[in-house]
Amino acid sequence: MTFKRYIPVESISELTINRLSIYLRCLQQLEKENITTISSQELAERFHLNSAQIRKDLAYFGEFGIRGVGYNAAQLREHLVNILGLSEERRVVVVGAGNLGTALSHFSGFNSGGFKIVAVCDADPQKIGKRIPGGLTVEDAALLPTLVKERRIHIGVITVPAAAAQQVFDDLVNAGIQAILNFAPAQLKGHPEVKLKNVDLKINLELLSFFLTHAARLASIT
């Protein structure tokens, strides 16, 4: 099995990277079931994926598996961990200690698999100093530059109201953060050297509403 980057990272789509994360979860499940070898076809059938897509996605990064035998599940999982940069700890700060920020701060998915939330910040004096579930204490958002430097933070998560989101984004950028996940329902002005990923939960609900509306119309026509 050879691990080699064949093409520039910037030419790889986010959809491909998202699928790598899915493949990683599938391989982790296989490992729990003590399955050591699996083909792309078996992997696709087992987890409702596309075998040709699996092979194409992996081909961006190297030659994996043995023809006629398949992939070594543990080795492929390790390669995906390295490709996704999860072999080193990624430290996270959550800005916004409301319901969402507090929930995320002790969500196991944000504190495992290479990620660790090391700070939760807010600008509200009534929240600063309060201990939240998970064991962290809310700190003053004005201390972001110091926190980012001293705790070697890599990723910022924005969970503030929409009106405050741009300022928080700018503060994170000025503090030296280069990767930001935004949960605020706001369209932010980005920065050329910072990767910004928006997660708007309401947009997904509206997508489902669109589906329900038009599915009902189609049903009435037929």
Image (cartoon, rainbow, N blue to C red):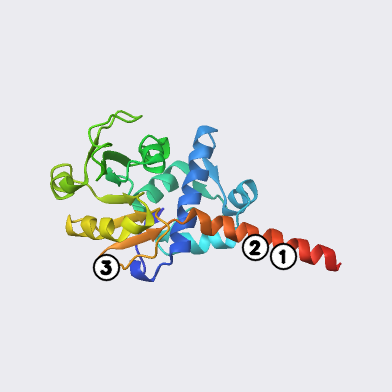
Neighbour class for label 3 at 10 Å: few (<14), some, many (≥20)? Answer: few
Secondary structure type for disc 2: helix
Disc 3 to disc 1, C-alpha distance: 37 Å
From this viewpoint, which residue is outermost toward the front? Answer: 126
Q: Residue at x 24, y 37 (%)?
A: 128
Disc 2 or disc 3, which is closer to the eye? 2
Q: Are marks 3 and 1 in contact (CB under 8 Å)?
A: no
Mark drawn on residue 191: 3
On the picture, is 211 further left or further right than 163?
Answer: right
Q: Residue at x 38, y 57 (%)?
A: 162
Can residue 82 be spotted in the picture?
A: yes
Secondary structure type for disc 3: loop
The residue beneath circle 1 is 214
Q: Residue 211's spot in the image, x, y percent?
A: 67, 61
Neighbour class for label 2 at 10 Å: few (<14), some, many (≥20)? Answer: few
Q: Residue at x 39, y 55 (%)?
A: 184
- N-term mark: 2 or 3: 3
Is 104 situated above or below 84?
Answer: above
Disc 2 to disc 3, C-alpha distance: 32 Å
**Mark 2: which amino acid?**
Phe
Q: Are marks 2 and 1 in contact (CB under 8 Å)?
A: yes
Q: 195 and 65: which one is in front?
A: 195
Looking at the rendered structure, the number of numbered marks drawn on it comes to 3
The residue beneath circle 2 is 210
**Mark 1: which amino acid?**
His
Is 191 situated above or below 90?
Answer: below
On the image, which quarter does residue 11 sit in? bottom left
**Mark 3: which amino acid?**
His
On the picture, is 173 further left or further right than 14?
Answer: left
